[in-house]
Structure formats: C-alpha cells, structure tokens
Amino acid sequence: MTQTLPSPDAPLRIGTRGSPLALAQAHETRDRLAAAFDLPREAFEIVVIKTTGDDRALIAADRPLKEIGGKGLFTKEIEEQLLSGGIDIAVHSMKDMPVAQPDGLVLDCYLPREDVRDAFISDACDGIAGLPEGAVVGSSSLRRRAQVLVRRPDVTVVEFRGNVQTRLRKLGDGVADCTFLAMAGLNRLGMDHLTTKPIDPDDMLPAVAQGAIGIERRGNDSRAAQLLEALHDAETGQRLAAERAFLATLDGSCETPIAGLAELSGSTLRLRGEILRPDGSEALADELTGAIADGAAMGAELARTLLGRAGPGFFDWKQG
C-alpha cells in the first residue's frame, strides 16, 4: 500500500450513529480494517454522530417514519461530516440507505452479508399463522406491515419504531403480541436467542439489502479507497447491485412497501422481487434468473415488469 496507514497519532475516523447496532457495525468495520493491515484498534477512532432522524424519532416515536421525513434523515448529518472532512469513512446499514449518494461521496465497499431473514418475535405463538384473531402486531416497516396484512388481514398493526432494545421493551410491556426484527441485527448484537422463529425468505421476502453493511467514503480520498478495497466482499456487491437497481427503478423509499433478494449459484444470479399496496390488500411478485454481470439490468427489468402489472396509484395509501 502506497498511502500512509492510520496510526494512534493520526487515526482513521469512522462515522456512525450511536445506537447499539450502529456501534456494533462500526466496531466490526474497525476490527476488520485492523486485522487486514495488522494495526492496533487505536489507529481508528469511532465518531458518533447524532442525526436529525434520531432526534425526530425520539419526539415522534408513534408516527410512521414517512411522516417525519424518511430514512434519509438518518444519513444527512453523517454524510455532511464526511464531505467536510470531519470523518474519513461512514458505516451504514444498507437496507436503510437511499439509492443515490450526494455528489462527492462513493458507496462501493460492502462487508460480507449477514443473515438476510426477518425474525419473528413473540411470547404468544411461534409464527404469523399462529397469531390469534385480532392480535396486535408491532412494526414500523411498511414492507413488514403490508406483508403481514396480506397474510393475516384480521390482525391490527401498530407503529413500533425505535432501536432493537426499544422495540423489545415495548413488546415486553404488552404494546403488541409480536414484532419483527432483522436476524442480522440480532446476530451482530449477540441477541439471536431472543428470536422465536426466523422467517424463510420463501415465506416472507426481506427488505432490499437486508443484512448488508456498506462503508461510504469521499470520492477523491485515495487512502480510504485503498483501505476499503481490502474489506470489500465481491459477492455481496454483486447481490446488492441487482437489488438496489430494482429499488432505484421502483423509486423505493420508506413510503413504498418493497422486498427483494438476490442469490448467487455459480455464475448465475436469481433475483426475486415483491411490491405491495401499503394497506396489504394486494401483493405482486416475480423473479428473474441470469448472469451475475447482468444483475443491475435484471433489477431494473424486474422492477419495470412489476410496475407494469401494478398500474398507476399502486403505492397510494387508501384511507379506511
């Protein structure tokens, strides 16, 4: 490596949100970099950045994310710090990332993907089918809410936002009979034992990029680019290229229930996608199989196919 390596006297600054899961992801990034270049942990500094989304989430914890500004609220301040040089790299949960980055920033490093499945968590039963009629399901994810209502239109879904610990506390307080979390987050926090049952993707397709960590950098920072090249997992990158192209063509945001998963087998990529009406009254799904190199094109094609079947207004909210 021709660039100067980080050191305790001049550490690489890693930006992150301050939730336990975000910190676990930042620590994983730091430890992988330290191992890759045989550096002490002190050669890296974890910089916690409070975002607008964190403040608004505390103020409006009972309101859907779309009503307080969308998931971009959780990246704005971090990306501003990256652009201004306050941090050198930023660590993100990819399922929460907008599909486009601000000018000057690049997102081209992904760590090996964790478990993509959703976790069903409940003391009342062992799965969606076993929920009693009229049960209360807690979820802040429009995708999960719609997927549950497609399967169980008899249940009530309530807003259930917050970090992993907050949502588990709400469940313990009886706010809902069950909730869902990402298996990846529970695994990274050492809390997978709390899972009642992992949900097979064949039964409930996960969010686009679920389980993947992405590391963002300045486009003109050659040192960061060389450091991150050592961490990049090519398979995760290939899968996310297809999934995020699918999301981008759908204009996916926190206001649209979308699921997608790319899987590799040899030189072949299988991409599955699903779009749902926000009230859970209809779901449309399809899949494509092709060469890995065509993943992004497949993502866009699959999105156009589903949009054509959906027709205008598919994602509009229906007032009950």
Image: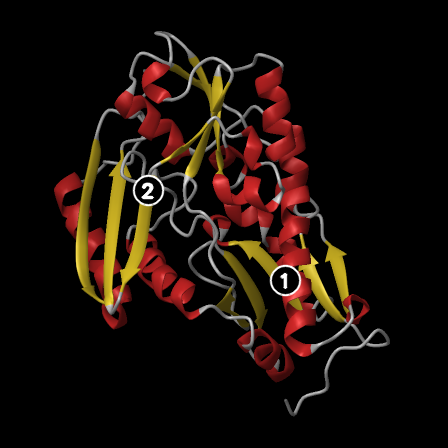
Q: How is the image coloured?
A: secondary structure
Task: Determine which residue is flagged by label 2.
Answer: 258
Measuring from the top left, give residue 125's x and y in whole percent.
43, 15
Query: Which residue is drawn at the image coordinates 39% and 44% (left, top)?
Result: 207
| Residue with the most extreme left position | 309
| Residue 239 in sight in this render | yes
Q: Residues within 10 Å of mark 1 (few under 14, many from 20)?
A: many
The kind of residue on which mark 1 rests is Thr
Look at the numbered discs 2 and 1 and tell me whether their residues touch, using CB distance below 8 Å: no
Task: Give the quadrant of the N terminus.
Answer: bottom right
Q: Is residue 159 left or right of residue 240?
A: right
Measuring from the top left, give residue 289's x and y in whole percent.
18, 59
Closest to the observer, 179 or 127: 127
| Residue with the most extreme front position | 193
Name the secondary structure under disc 2: strand
* Image height of 222 relative to 139, above or below: below
Task: Give the quadrant of the C terminus.
Answer: top left
Closest to the observer, 291 or 155: 291
Mark toward the start of the polypeptide (2 vs 1): 1
| Residue 83 in sight in this render | no
Could you tell me how far apart the alpha carbons at marks 2 and 1 are, in whole angstroms? Answer: 28 Å
The kind of residue on which mark 2 rests is Ile
Measuring from the top left, give residue 213's x and y in whole percent.
52, 57
Query: Which residue is drawn at the image coordinates 63% and 42% (left, top)?
Result: 189
Q: Is residue 287 left or right of residue 315?
A: left
Query: Which residue is drawn at the image coordinates 32% and 30% (left, top)?
Result: 147
Query: Which residue is drawn at the image coordinates 52% and 62% (left, top)?
Result: 111
Q: Nearer the viewer, mark 2 or mark 1?
A: 1
Task: Determine which residue is flagged by label 1.
Answer: 29
